[in-house]
Image (cartoon, grey):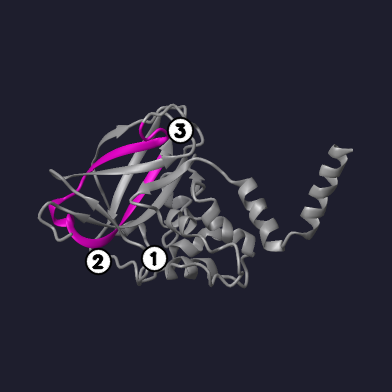
Amino acid sequence: MKKRFSLLAGMLFALTMPAHAAENIEAKAIGPKHGATLIPKARQVICEQDGGYNHPDDGSNIPNAACRNAFLYKAETIPIWERRQMFTEWPAYSQNLQGTQHPSDKVPDGQLCSAGIAKFEGIDQPHADWYVSSVSVKDGQATLYFDATQVHEPSKWTVSLAKPSFNAATDKLKWSDLTPLEVTKVTVPPPAKGNHVKYAGVYQIEVKIPADRADGKQTLLYVQWERQDPARETFFSCSDVRFNGESAAK
């Protein structure tokens, strides 16, 4: 009898719950895996952590103006549950690059931050209020962290900086905007979580930062993480950042 009552109660809850709550449960159930840049935080990670996108539908509870602008982008044509996935599916900004000569075959100019995924295009939109992380540079090196909800090895990392001419307030990122950085070391996380190892599930990536870019000025960091397998599944992250050298203004 108790079991039957529990089943009935669950059915009643599903029937009476608000529509936006049902959509949120659906989005979380779909939740993909793999990863995004954690330090400095990728745009979609910031928007997901800030919250406010579940209700009301006009996005007025989203605290960051750039995230709110992303959420409302093409609101008339992109269903709200897909626009919520732009944040809830923060690790899913990916493309399979098998058969391509360059990532631009799948990720065109102006859609680098969204990985060329139409429902995530809000994250590409220029805005003056994108949150800017600060990362210290010591001896010409900076340490980045990438949150891997699912670890893949072997893999390849490509890390780039937008040229000084790029302006996040007015520009969508293009491939020609990027200057590659030298990756000097990648620390692979333990495959199992919950083992009390520091940064379990998080890659630590050391990169060289040119002296003239460790100037405390805002720029954009672009990280590509490619699985070394036939599909060449690759994850893309945009992080607004300033690199502070030892003599740069903090």
Query: Which is more N-terminal, label 2 or label 1?
Result: 2
Quadrant position of the C terminus in the picture = bottom left
Residue placed under numbered mark 3 in the picture = 151
Badge 1 element: loop
Q: Which residues are magenta?
A: 198-225
At x 38%, y 45%, the residue is 224
Residue 90 at x, y = what percent?
50, 51
Q: Is residue 205 magenta?
A: yes
Which of these two is toward me, 122 or 200? 200
Name the residue nearer the viewer: 160 or 238: 238
- 77 relative to 171 in the view: left or right: right
Q: Residues within 10 Å of mark 3 (few under 14, many from 20)?
A: many
Instruction: Please provide percent x and percent y for residue 126.
Output: 40, 69
Q: CA distance from mark 3 to mark 2?
A: 35 Å
Q: In 3D space, how far apart are the residues under numbered discs 3 and 1 (Cα atoms)?
A: 30 Å
Res 172 label = 1
Amino acid type at mark 1: Lys
Left/right placement of residue 129 relative to residue 123 reads left
